[in-house]
Image (cartoon, rainbow, N blue to C red):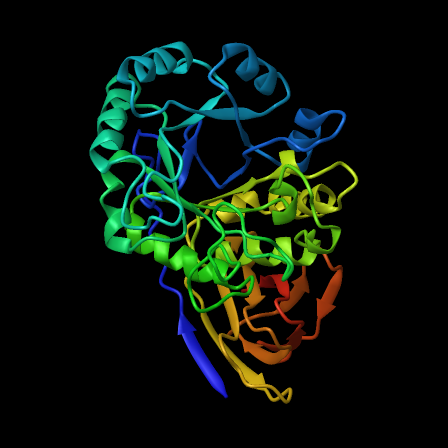
């Protein structure tokens, strides 16, 4: 089975002078920047230092200058929530922090359209969000406004909020133990998402959905899972239901989101994750890898003529391998994930490819006439560096 795909280049637009470039990539100190952030710091002895060393750019903070001072001293920046209902408070928050060197962006309200078990209602109206946005932008044109949606609701409903944000996001947390009990944000089937795909590969589906919401010029973030659902319960937790994302799942979800065109990644839930849990160690490893390729992640998508031929492994092919290419010194980075629950084996063909290295695995790949063969575990992920003429 052969599939061909041509990635059209997103033209590298010159800096717009505003907080985002023309394709939605954040401009930080005038430079295109792929954003990596945390809603909460890890439960460790020196969380700010550890986050900064891992490659985190930004953390969510209360609207207090002292907290922004502390984050900036550690090499981080912050974002804060202004609220939407009290426009006088919105103005006070913006005026107090708009000149702070540690400010990255603003947030008005989280998940304004989401009302649990009452999907035909909204928590905060689009009009209220737009009024807050206009107040912020009237006082500060240098920092973008970020809006995170629940993964549910129709695209048309979510688009009604577009005039209140420069960056659109959604939070999807698909790693849920079968024994998980009903709780806030989980539907009667025990899942947070509501698409047919219930695996970790639903991250890519929701990224595509949110790009439909955001359009081509807004930034697009994904908020990913840094917790176990059972740990969100305040008491009577069932140890059998405590299921954290593994390091491999964390890597897959991050790279799949990138393959689907996001301009930033945030993680939620570390405050509910005890120090002895393996989540922060796994996430820190993924962040360090992403830190090493941040220049490439911020670059426009590369145009490459890449052909894939799948080899039979005894399984059907569903989504197959999803990928994106970014320019790098001497060639391109190929970020690829197996979006299937079964292993896949394939041959890549890229005219002119001279050599291929699997980054972070320290593994060269044999290339012949621009082709190389490799396999992927279920929901496996790879980053190739391909040297071109």
Q: For this rendering, which residue is in front, 21 or 269?
A: 269
Q: Residue at x 34, y 11 (%)?
A: 92
User: Farthest residue toward the right?
Assistant: 276
User: Is 321 drawn above or below residue 8 in the view shown?
Assistant: below
Residue 326 appears in view: no
Q: Residue at x 60, y 35 (%)?
A: 56
Toward which corner of the image does residue 164 lie, by quadrant?
top left
| Quadrant showing the C terminus | bottom right
Q: For this rendering, which residue is in front, 44 or 337?
A: 44
User: Is 373 drawn above or below residue 124 in the view shown?
Assistant: below
Image location (x, y in percent) of residue 88: 28, 13
Lateral position of residue 192 relative to residue 248, left or right: left
Image location (x, y in percent) of residue 9: 37, 58
Lateral position of residue 193 relative to residue 333, left or right: left
Q: Residue at x 67, y 63 (%)?
A: 357
Lateral position of residue 58 relative to residue 374, left or right: left
Q: For this rendering, which residue is in front, 224 or 173?
A: 173
Residue 42 appears in view: yes
Image location (x, y in percent) of residue 369: 59, 80
Q: Residue at x 49, y 45 (%)?
A: 184
Image label count: 0
Image location (x, y in percent) of residue 4: 43, 78
Lateral position of residue 97 relative to residue 163, left or right: right
User: Is 7 drawn above or below residue 276 in the view shown?
Assistant: below
């Amino acid at each position: 089975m052969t599939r061909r795909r041509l990635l059209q280049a997103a033209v590298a637009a010159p800096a717009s002078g505003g907080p985002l470039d023309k394709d939605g990539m954040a401009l930080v100190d005038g430079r295109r920047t792929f954003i990596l952030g945390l809603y909460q710091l890890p439960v460790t002895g020196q969380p700010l230092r550890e986050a900064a060393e891992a490659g985190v750019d930004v953390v969510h903070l209360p609207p207090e200058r002292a907290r922004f001072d502390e984050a900036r001293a550690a090499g981080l920046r912050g974002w804060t929530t202004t609220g939407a209902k009290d426009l006088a408070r919105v103005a006070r928050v913006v005026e107090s922090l708009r000149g702070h060197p540690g400010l990255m962006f603003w947030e008005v309200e989280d998940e304004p359209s989401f009302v649990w078990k009452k999907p035909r209602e909204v928590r905060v109206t689009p009009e209220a969000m737009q009024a807050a946005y206009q107040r912020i932008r009237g006082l500060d044109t240098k920092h973008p406004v970020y809006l995170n949606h629940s993964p549910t609701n129709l695209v048309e409903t979510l688009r009604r909020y577009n005039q209140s944000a420069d960056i659109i996001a959604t939070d999807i947390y698909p790693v849920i133990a079968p024994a998980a009990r009903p709780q806030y944000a989980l539907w009667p089937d025990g899942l947070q998402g509501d698409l047919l795909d219930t695996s970790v590969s639903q991250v890519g589906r929701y990224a595509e959905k949110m790009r439909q919401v955001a359009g081509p010029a807004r930034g697009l973030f994904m908020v990913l899972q840094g917790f176990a659902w059972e740990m969100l319960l305040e008491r009577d937790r069932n140890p059998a239901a405590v299921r954290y994302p593994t390091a491999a799942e964390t890597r897959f979800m991050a790279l799949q989101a990138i393959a689907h065109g996001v301009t930033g990644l945030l993680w939620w839930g570390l405050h509910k994750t005890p120090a002895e849990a393996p989540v922060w160690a796994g996430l820190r490893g993924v962040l360090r890898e992403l830190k090493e390729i941040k220049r490439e992640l911020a670059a426009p998508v590369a145009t490459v003529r890449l052909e894939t031929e799948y080899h039979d492994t005894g399984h059907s092919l569903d989504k197959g391998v999803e990928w994106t290419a970014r320019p790098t010194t001497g060639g391109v980075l190929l970020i690829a994930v197996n979006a299937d629950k079964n292993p896949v084996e394939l041959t890549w063909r890229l005219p002119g490819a001279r050599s291929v290295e699997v980054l972070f695995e320290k593994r060269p790949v044999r290339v012949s006439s621009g082709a190389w063969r490799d396999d992927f575990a279920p929901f496996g992920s790879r980053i190739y560096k391909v040297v071109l003429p």
